[in-house]
Image (tube, rainbow, N blue to C red):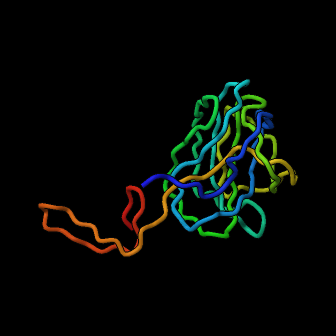
């Protein structure tokens, strides 16, 4: 089963917008009820560097509990980069926040449209995504970044069997590599 776009923004343009040593959070609405298992970042062709990325729940319009994070530096190549995360269940119509901190100015490209953004200074080299996101953020409603969550839709009522082992079971939900 191929991955599907689930939240974020994939229509990008060449300008880049991030500043290094900043903890950014961008609020996006989920397009489907599904399992997110990777976050994608679109790196500009003119800058090089690394990024740390996370996904947070929404708490009354503000970033809330951390759902998963990659606190290690991930090298980004020009264009779209896929960063695996632990499976995170999302619900269609619900808002989530994608968080990012980068090692270089202008590393992530802009995207069409606008969204709610939170940001504050956070030294990249020692940064780990907090749980919950915390307070002290500046806020803006402006350009999006090339950030997106991708994953698989659950398959309800699937029958799974192991041939030769004599085992067959019913599961209420099944997604890429996961039985629930």
Image quadrant assignment for residue 46: top right
Q: Residue at x 13, y 62 (%)?
A: 165
- The total number of labels drawn is 0
Q: Is residue 78 left or right of residue 176?
A: right
Please provide percent x and percent y for residue 103.
70, 30
In this view, the residue in front, 95 or 60, is 95
Relative height, residue 25 to residue 170 (above, below): above
Q: Residue at x 68, y 58 (%)?
A: 132
Q: Is residue 173 left or right of residue 80?
A: left
Q: Residue at x 68, y 53 (%)?
A: 8
Please provide percent x and percent y for residue 145.
75, 45
In this view, the residue in front, 160 or 118, is 160
Whether residue 53 is visible here, answered yes or no, is yes
In this view, the residue in front, 9 or 91, is 9
Q: Residue at x 63, y 64 (%)?
A: 31
Please provide percent x and percent y for residue 6.
60, 58
Quarter that holds the C terminus: bottom left
Whether residue 139 is visible here, answered yes or no, is no
Relative height, residue 2 to residue 49 (above, below): below
In this view, the residue in front, 68 or 6, is 6
Image quadrant assignment for residue 179: bottom left
Quarter that holds the N terminus: bottom left
Please provide percent x and percent y for residue 44.
71, 31
């Amino acid at each position: 089963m191929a991955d599907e776009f689930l939240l974020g923004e994939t229509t990008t343009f060449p300008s880049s917008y991030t500043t290094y040593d900043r903890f950014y959070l961008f609020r996006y609405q989920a397009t489907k009820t599904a399992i997110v298992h990777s976050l994608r970042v679109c790196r500009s062709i003119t800058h090089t560097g690394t990024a740390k990325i996370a996904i947070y729940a929404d708490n009354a319009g503000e970033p809330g509990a951390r759902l998963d994070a990659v606190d290690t530096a991930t090298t980004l190549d020009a264009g779209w980069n896929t960063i695996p995360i632990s499976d995170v269940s999302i619900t269609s119509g619900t808002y989530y926040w994608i968080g990012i901190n980068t090692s270089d100015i202008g590393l992530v490209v802009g995207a069409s449209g606008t969204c709610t953004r939170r940001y504050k200074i956070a030294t990249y080299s020692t940064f780990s995504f907090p749980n919950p996101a915390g307070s002290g953020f500046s806020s803006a409603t402006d350009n999006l970044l090339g950030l997106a969550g991708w994953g698989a839709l659950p398959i309800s009522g699937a029958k799974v069997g192991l041939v030769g082992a004599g085992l067959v079971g019913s599961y209420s939900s099944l997604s890429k590599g996961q039985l629930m």
